[in-house]
Amino acid sequence: MDELDLAIPKSILDSLPEEGPTGQDMERALEDYQRRVNHAIREADDDAEAAATALDVIEHLESRAQTYDDFVPELRAWGQSPIYAIAWRNFCVSLIDQFYEHEALAERLDRERNARIVDDGIRLSDMYRD
């Protein structure tokens, strides 16, 4: 499986105010996510192991995106600019999209997500308890 080459969309960086280190913070976060997944791709015995690590990162990004999204109305209610929360939310969503644009990984991600659902023990009989 080929390694990932992630990027921060220019539109996200352009939306940020000039002052402040947020762009640099995003770059460091991007490098960490990319390093973690590419290490798993290089070291994994099979593609399923690499997909499991990538899905862990994706689930983390989904959680972060939801948290930032929840901040937006709260910041607006307090009269604060939500631009940083919006930028970080969009950053997380963009990275998730980039994971799924990687052909070999995208196929494995869906398999891994379905396997986790089954491993969690969701069964039809659980829905009909008395």
Image (cartoon, grey):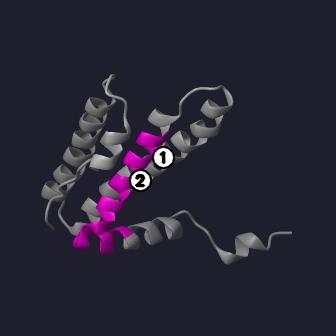
Task: Find residue 49 and name its label.
Answer: none
Local crowd at mark 1 within 10 Å, few (<14), some, or many (≥20)? many
Residue at 17% x, 55% y is 5
* In the rendered image, the vertical position of residue 39 relative to residue 41, given as above or below: above
Is the residue 73 above or below the residue 22 in the image? below
Q: Which amino acid does label 1 sit on?
A: Ala
Residue 122 in percent (x, y) is at 61, 69
Residue position marked by numbered label 2 in the rendering: 93
Residue 99 is a magenta residue: yes
Asked if the residue under mark 2 is in contact with the one under mark 1, i.e. CB atoms within 8 Å, the reply is yes
In the image, what residue occupies the spot 17% across and 50% down?
A: 39
Element marked by disc 2? helix
Distance between the Cα atoms at labels 1 and 2?
A: 7 Å
Q: Which amino acid does label 2 sit on?
A: Val
Quadrant, the C terminus: bottom right
Main SS of the magenta part reads helix
Magenta part of the chain: 86-109
Relative to 38, say whether 84 is above or below: above
Q: Tag on residue 65? A: 1
Specify the quadrant of the image occupied by residue 51. Answer: bottom left
Q: Is label 1 in a helix, a strand or a loop? A: helix
